[in-house]
Image (tube, grey):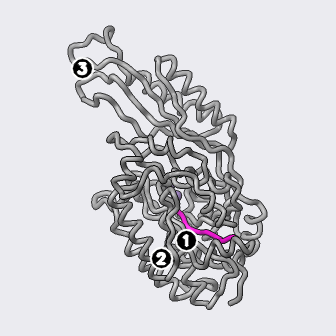
Amino acid sequence: MTSNDATTAGAEATFAGMWRDLAPVGRDGRSGGYQRFAWTREDHTLREWFASEAERRGLDLTVDRVGNQWAWWGDPDAALAAGRPGIATGSHLDSVPDGGAFDGPLGVVSAFASVDALRERGFEPDRPIAVVNFVDEEGARFGVACAGSRVLTGAMTADRARSLTDADGVSMAEALRAAGRDPEELGPDADNVRRVGTFVELHVEQGRHLSLPEVDQPVAVGSDIWPHGRWRLHTLGEANHAGTTRLADRDDAMLGFAAAVIAARRAAESHGCVATIGKVVVTPGGVNAIASEVTGWLDARGSDESAVRRVVADVTEVVEEFGGLVVEDSWTGTTPFDPGLARRIATRLGGIPVLGTGAGHDAGILANAGVPTAMLFVRNPTGISHSPEEFATSEDCLAGVAALTTVLLDLAGGAS
Ligand code: GLV
Ligand code: MN
Ligand code: MN
């Protein structure tokens, strides 16, 4: 690891220590991937880790109505009253099924390391700085991505969130109760949102633009997030014996679903989008039983909102032809980040690349709620993400910490 202008040897050491501490939590010994889902035992361990990192630094830990954790350096309410709302930075600690180590944790660990670097330099911010851990960003357990920031900002109602269920039929309300939280407390939390004058999320790149030989840079600033959403596809049939039921007598829910999978690929190709069906539940789920019900999840994204809508319309037509049903689970339109802030950051960091992304982030939800928001991306040499293969070098991670530290120095003014 190399030292860097804005970061410090101390911050490099704390980064390495935090990374080591998180490495075993929820790690699958066989694949090397992570199973870190909202309100599970692993999530509890990660939340305890966050709380202890806050305590170790003397930061004030607050937990909002949704369960997102905020570790404040400085008093956000006093600053707000004085017209100097705080700056929040961080990301999430949960993962997709068999996810990588970097998506989420890199932003949280870098945020703590940047606070360490600022303090080591003797920096006194002129506005409070928070490190944040957004709960349930991936939506791996209850189906809706960015659930923590959506409920926080009112983009999803508490009633809807409480009623979402996981694969075992456990509702979010029940999961919250099991985790020791009162589900009735869940709801939008304007007081916590108001404290955040600016949000900056650092994230591993999900793609390989920064590795292109003509780019070759460790860090970029985000411009916008593609429109994207999730839809549930249901097809129905009749369970029956795989050996004794004549083809002509079958009502096989799998056929409509299979047609929908092919339709999704074709529609994505013809409308210039991407579409993925990566999760499916078959009932009754026996090798020797005809499917009575199939539920699959369509994820569709693209640079153009109407093109994404056309993909979904094409798939819906096929599902409905088979008597099935399509239900929208979530939708986020084109999300630009604050252009002035992105320009300021790009300039401050020496003209780094400006990148759009097809990945969703809590930063997008905050931006849509009117919070001036920016993202930093750290080079991912293979571009692979949502997989155990996801990777960034230590040097690039530390370049990310240095960039974030510079951004916080700039935004929090102060004296050093
Ligand atoms: C979140 O990582 C998403 O883009 O699905
Ligand atoms: Mn992700
Ligand atoms: Mn993420």
Stretch in magenta:
85-91
In the picture of the structure, the residue carrying the numbered disc 1 is 131
Judge whether residue 268 can be spotted in this image. Answer: yes
Query: Where's the C terminus, which quadrant?
Result: bottom right
Looking at marks 3 and 2 on the same chain, the residue that comes earlier in the sequence is marked by: 2
Residue sitting at x 62%, y 39%: 273
How packed mark 1 is, by other alpha carbons closer than 10 Å (few <14, some 14-19, many 20 or more), is many
Residue sitting at x 51%, y 69%: 62
Residue 60 in the image, given as x and y percentages of width and height: 52, 76
Residue sitting at x 50%, y 65%: 63
Q: Main secondary structure of the magenta part?
A: strand
How far is disc 1 from disc 3 in space, using C-alphas? 55 Å
Residue 380 in the image, given as x and y percentages of width and height: 53, 63
How far is disc 3 from disc 2 in space, using C-alphas? 57 Å
In the picture of the structure, the residue carrying the numbered disc 3 is 242
Looking at marks 1 and 3 on the same chain, the residue that comes earlier in the sequence is marked by: 1
Magenta stretch holds residue 80:
no
Q: Quadrant of residue 328?
A: top right
In the picture of the structure, the residue carrying the numbered disc 2 is 54
Q: Regarding mark 2 in the picture, which secondary structure is present there?
A: helix
